Image: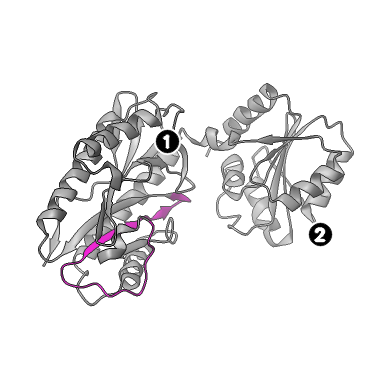
């Protein structure tokens, strides 16, 4: 990954925003801006301090060896602290000519108060500076997301041969995870959703102990993770014969999925893409059962910029990766969601979720 180019873009933003330094504390953003791999986990004690001249990583002895190894031949230097890394950061800043320190708005409130008191309030909150840089994917990032999507497709194909009445939702989720791990996934991109019967009308139902029965709708939303990058896909199947109502809803959701993908191209707004699918469901009399946004960006996080929703007013850049996931949820009865992962291009999109979307009845 090209850490120097990422640093250059962030320093440009620092200059534009008239900040002399930036503190990066969100783990995913630390990984992105450093380009380090296999060093930090979700609970790591780490922060990055960036100025126009320096790029420093603060951590403790648990991560020191791996961080120093990763930092070789990069612009980053590693500072290992035996006490709180934030005490060390503030001490280092107090000894310099700090004008304004930009910090991420996601920082815990107590940590913000500590830093603010030590630096006499010379702070500037940033809102998604690095997340905006992450929208457009580098070729190496696209390659990893594509590999994760391929693993996800393979897992869906495998589960179709395993899914039977009598299994619990949790057992299906475990089968998906074990398959993806055995094929090279780094765990899962997010906790898998396997929602059966009436649970499928809850968009984020999770995977519980409900036993899947004949006649149930089974909604599966899951994704592999490869090289730190996520995939995200949803498919909905039925155990046994599909009812006429289910067929009608499924067909409408599938056409909304196609309408959303047809609307995707570089430089449209998230609102416009969302409206293409939402208007189709409105014409089908089902829009009131579609409560969430049409999609979101995917990368190091499974939910990131850009946003495709009625509130997604920013433009969707070419080179971003987004989901297209319309859903219709008939409360207490069943739900249908069909989600594809696509790469946004200047004149359209490239679909990288290739699992079949025809109505599937498992008999």
Q: Is residue 238 above or below residue 21?
A: below
Q: Is residue 331 covered in magenta?
A: no
Q: Which residues are magenta?
A: 204-229
Q: Secondary structure at mark 2?
A: loop
Is 281 in front, or is 95?
Answer: 281
Q: Answer left or right for 259 relative to 320.
A: left
Quick one: which residue is furthest to the bottom in this view?
Answer: 166
Q: Answer left or right for 101 relative to 197.
A: right
Distance from the alpha carbon under mark 2 to that under mark 1: 38 Å
Residue drawn at point x = 12 percent, y = 60 percent: 242
Please name the residue that numbered disc 2 is placed on: 82
Q: From where the camera sits, is residue 339 visible?
A: no
Please name the residue that numbered disc 1 is placed on: 139
Residue drawn at point x = 85 percent, y = 44 percent: 117
Q: Secondary structure at mark 1?
A: helix
Q: Pick whichever of labels 2 and 1 is earlier in the sequence.
A: 2
Is 103 in front, or is 64?
Answer: 103
Q: Position of residue 110 (x, y in %)?
A: 75, 52
């Amino acid at each position: 990954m090209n850490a120097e180019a990422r640093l250059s873009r962030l320093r440009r933003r620092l200059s534009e925003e008239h900040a002399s330094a930036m503190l990066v504390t969100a783990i995913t953003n630390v990984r992105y801006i450093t380009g380090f791999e296999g060093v930090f986990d979700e609970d790591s004690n780490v922060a990055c301090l960036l100025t126009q001249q320096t790029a420093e990583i603060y951590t403790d002895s648990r991560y020191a060896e791996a961080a120093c190894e990763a930092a070789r031949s990069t612009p980053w230097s590693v500072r290992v602290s035996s006490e709180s890394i934030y005490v060390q950061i503030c001490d280092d800043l107090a000894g310099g000519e700090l004008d304004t320190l930009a910090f991420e708005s996601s920082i815990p409130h107590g940590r913000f108060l500590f830093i603010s008191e030590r630096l006499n309030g010379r702070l500037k909150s940033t809102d998604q500076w690095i997340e905006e840089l992450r929208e457009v994917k580098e070729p190496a990032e696209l390659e990893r997301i594509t590999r994760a999507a391929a693993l996800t497709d393979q897992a869906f194909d495998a589960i179709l041969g395993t899914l039977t009445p009598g299994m619990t939702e949790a057992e299906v989720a475990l089968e998906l995870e074990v398959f993806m791990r055995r094929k090279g996934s780094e765990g899962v991109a997010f906790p898998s959703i396997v929602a059966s019967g009436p649970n499928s009308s809850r968009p984020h139902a999770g995977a519980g102990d409900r036993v899947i029965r004949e006649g149930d709708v089974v909604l599966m939303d899951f994704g592999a993770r490869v090289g730190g990058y996520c995939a995200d896909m949803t498919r909905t199947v039925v155990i046994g014969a599909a009812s006429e109502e289910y067929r009608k809803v499924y067909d409408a959701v599938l056409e909304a999925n196609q309408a959303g993908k047809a609307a995707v191209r570089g430089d449209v707004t998230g609102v416009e893409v969302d409206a293409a699918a939402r208007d189709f469901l409105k014409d089908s009399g089902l829009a009131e059962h579609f409560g969430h946004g049409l999609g979101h960006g995917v990368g190091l996080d499974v939910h990131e910029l850009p946003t495709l929703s009625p509130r997604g007013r920013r433009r969707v850049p070419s080179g971003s990766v987004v989901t297209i996931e319309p859903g219709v949820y008939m409360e207490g009865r069943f739900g249908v969601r069909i989600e594809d992962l696509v790469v946004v291009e200047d004149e359209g999109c490239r679909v990288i979720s290739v699992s079949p979307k025809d109505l599937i009845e498992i008999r």
